[in-house]
Image (cartoon, rainbow, N blue to C red):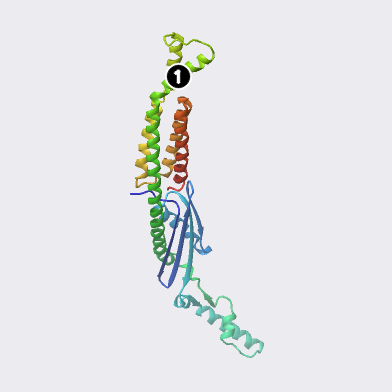
Amino acid sequence: MSLKSMTGYGHGSATRHGITVDVELTSVNRKQLDLQMNLPRSLVSLEPRILEKIHKFITRGRITVDISVRWTGAKRRHAIRVDYTLAEEYVKSLRKVAKKLGLEDTMGVDTLLSLPEVVRCARPDEDIEAIWDTAGIALSKALKGMMRMRSREGLELQKDIEHRLDLLGRHVSQIRKETPRVIKRYRAALQKRLSMAGVDADNNDDRFHREIVYFADRSDITEELVRLDSHLKQAGKMARSKDATGRSMDFLAQEIFREINTIGSKANDSEILKTVIVFKAELERIREQIQNVE
């Protein structure tokens, strides 16, 4: 399995019950799941169903949902409603009035059409269930398309992150290799400074040895290296997980940064510091990539 990117696009279309629904989905980076829906006002009631369906596939990212609905001519024709009972009552009442007032009876279709509530066109979008039956199919198609794109990009992210994690592992090995030399370099540097200050430093001097021991204890980075190894292994497992691990990887990257930062401070060694700087630069590239991982 591979990581999933938060960037994607999908389109789906379906036609049923004389209704055609088009759905477009776009997704970009966002720490939480954030849905922006562009629906016809009459379909706002479908928002909870759309959210539930999307949430089954996606846990992070800003998702924009665009839905358009079209009706066939037959669907529109069937939407015409004539109230025959009301029309008959209108005709009876108007003719009665015309007879009483001595007016000419000119009742025609045009007159009936002008009367309130006799003829109306029922809104096709009033049939929410029929629309959802079609929209659900179109939404599923759009989701599948978007998930394919997110998976393809996620695979590339995974390859890049795993490569960079391997580089971090090499840097840790280099730091571990340099660790035993830190004391030797410090001892030599201390002797040189004492000599330059005109102090005759005897290697058998207790004060000299205490200073070396104190420095060795203060600069010990064994625990940090062990934790770094553990963090890098966890990061590798997360990169290969089928679950959404973006948040966890982001947190783990912060922990890795704290450990390497501590190593740079405690080691107090120029050679290790060089590797720490390179490590941090590579880690920052990983953190940038993780921002796009679901």
Residue 195: image x %, image y %? Answer: 50, 14
Seen from the viewer's position, the closer of residues 90 and 59 is 59
Residue 80: image x %, image y %? Answer: 49, 77
Task: Give the number of callouts.
Answer: 1
- Residue at x 47% of width, y 32% of height: 274
Q: Is residue 91 left or right of residue 273?
A: right
The furthest residue to the top: 205
Seen from the viewer's position, the closer of residues 210 and 143 is 210
Seen from the viewer's position, the closer of residues 208 and 155 is 208
Q: Is residue 107 above or below residue 237?
A: below
The furthest residue to the left: 1
Residue at numbered disc 1: 188
Seen from the viewer's position, the closer of residues 279 and 249 is 279
Badge 1: how crowded within 10 Å, few (<14), some, or many (20+)?
few
- Residue at x 40% of width, y 30% of height: 175
Q: Is residue 110 left or right of residue 60?
A: right
Residue 137: image x %, image y %? Answer: 39, 64
- Residue at x 40% of width, y 26% of height: 179
- Residue 144: quadrant of the picture: bottom left
User: SS for tag 1?
Assistant: helix
Residue 174: image x %, image y %? Answer: 39, 32
The amino acid type, in three-letter code, at marker 1 is Ala
